[in-house]
């Protein structure tokens, strides 16, 4: 009941604030017309003074007084019309009641409908009832799973379900606990071990700890196709200063990756960081790969691994030059321009990357969607598009 009283007081206060300006009109219309008539009378007296002082002639004075008199008559007609149509105090009272009625009708109608259709005496639904029917509420689903696991802590499937949810919510301590319980109860699997390792890396701000490295190594031993675990295992070698081993591990990932895989460009960057020749970044979507000339296929990638670093660098440069030549002949290819800019940046040739960016923006202006993609790439890579952007 206290809540209802509080809501009623708040509603009344807000309504009063809204109604007050509408209820206090500036000045009655009748008073405004009386002031206007007084102005006209002053003008008549002024005309008489000017005539007495010889400032205007008799004819001009007559014309002026006639015009002022016409205005006074028109004002008198307006007064008569206002009285005939029920103006005055009664009209002003109706005018003041109109906004009051409009503002109060909405909450009154809503309150009546709620009292008729709703149930104000219904108590708040307890947590138990809400957990029984959580619907699509993720927080309630997690709470329901947590309550279930509190009662049955040996349910491995429940820990399997919660672990990735905790990780995505950045509840890293809970995620580690859930992964360890899932591994203890359900046994080791490549996905569980990789999830545990990734959680440990996130908890240590990107550092692959010894515990995390052991988890990734076990995940790779169980499933060599787990590219996520292989990447972190290679990253552990890189962070340990074992550049040759890290480079070979990243090159092996690149060799085993399907064409157009999302991680190819990232793996290529790490190959370059560890002394190898990075592969020019590839589009991640198969459709984009078909549109972008010069995209290496699986056979080319495999052949590239057999070359020396110098030969591989020459091969990559040749592929990028081929892509640039094709874009000069057929510039209407946004995926090709994006790939060319990225390729030059991977090769460390910022001047050519900038030239490619500007050439692409000439074909795809910045006010188009394709041009905005080029500008986004420029911002991402730190290139300047000065001189071609609007």
Image: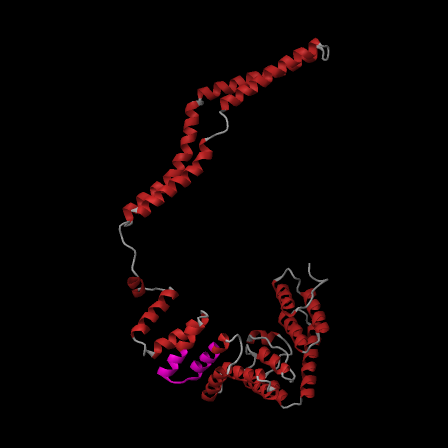
- Is 159 placed left or right of 46 in the picture? left
**Which image quadrant is residue 131 in?**
bottom left
| Viewport quadrant of the C terminus | bottom right
**Which image quadrant is residue 163 in?**
bottom left
Residue 164 appears anywhere in the view: no
Which residue is located at x 49 percent, y 21 percent?
A: 30
Residue farthest along the left direction in this orientation: 121
- Is 56 placed left or right of 18 in the picture? right
Please provide the residue range marked out in magenta. Answer: 179-199
- Is 247 placed left or right of 57 in the picture? left
Give the camera-side residue of 169 and 251: 169
Give the camera-side residue of 171 and 85: 171
Residue 79: x and y in percent read: 50, 19
Residue 100: x and y in percent read: 40, 35
- The structure's colour scheme is secondary structure
Residue 358 lies in the magenta stretch: no
**Image position of 179 with respect to 36: above or below:** below
- Is 277 placed left or right of 240 in the picture? right
Give the camera-side residue of 340 and 237: 237
Residue 20 appears anywhere in the view: yes
Q: Main secondary structure of the magenta part?
A: helix
**Image position of 221 with respect to 155: above or below:** below
Residue 11: x and y in percent read: 38, 42
Give the camera-side residue of 336 and 271: 271
Residue 308: x and y in percent read: 67, 90
């Amino acid at each position: 009941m206290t809540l209802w009283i509080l809501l009623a007081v708040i509603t009344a206060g807000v309504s009063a604030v809204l109604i007050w300006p509408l209820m206090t009109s500036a000045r009655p219309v009748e008073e405004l017309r009386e002031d206007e008539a007084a102005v006209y009378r002053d003008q008549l007296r002024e005309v008489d003074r000017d005539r007495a002082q010889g400032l205007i002639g008799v004819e001009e004075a007559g014309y002026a007084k006639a015009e002022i008199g016409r205005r006074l008559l028109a004002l008198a007609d307006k007064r008569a019309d206002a009285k005939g149509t029920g103006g005055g105090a009664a009209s002003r009272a109706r005018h003041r009641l109109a906004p009051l009625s409009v503002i109060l009708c909405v909450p009154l109608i809503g309150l009546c409908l709620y009292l008729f259709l709703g149930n104000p005496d219904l108590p708040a639904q307890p947590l138990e009832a809400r957990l029984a029917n959580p619907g699509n509420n993720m927080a309630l689903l997690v709470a329901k799973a947590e309550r279930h696991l509190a009662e049955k802590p040996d349910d491995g499937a429940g820990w399997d379900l919660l672990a990735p949810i905790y990780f995505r919510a950045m509840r890293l301590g809970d995620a580690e606990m859930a992964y360890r319980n899932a591994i203890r109860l359900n046994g080791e699997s490549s996905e569980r071990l990789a999830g545990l390792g990734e959680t440990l890396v996130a908890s240590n701000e990107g550092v692959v700890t010894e515990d995390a490295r052991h988890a990734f190594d076990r995940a790779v031993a169980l499933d060599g196709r787990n590219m996520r675990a292989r990447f972190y295992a290679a990253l552990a070698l890189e962070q340990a200063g074992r550049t040759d081993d890290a480079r070979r591990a990243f090159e092996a990932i690149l060799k085993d990756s399907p064409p157009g895989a999302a991680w190819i460009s990232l793996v290529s960057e790490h190959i370059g960081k560890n002394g190898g020749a990075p592969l020019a970044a590839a589009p991640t979507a198969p459709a984009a790969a078909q549109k972008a000339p010069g995209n290496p296929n699986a056979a080319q990638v495999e052949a590239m691994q057999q070359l020396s670093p110098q030969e591989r660098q020459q091969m990559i440069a040749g592929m990028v030059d081929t892509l640039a030549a094709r874009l000069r002949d057929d510039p209407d290819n946004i995926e090709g321009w994006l790939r060319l800019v990225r390729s030059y940046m991977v090769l460390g040739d910022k001047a050519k990357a900038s030239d490619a960016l500007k050439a692409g923006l000439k074909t795809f202006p910045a006010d188009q969607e394709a041009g905005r993609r080029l500008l986004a790439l420029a911002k991402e890579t730190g290139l300047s598009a000065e001189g071609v952007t609007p």
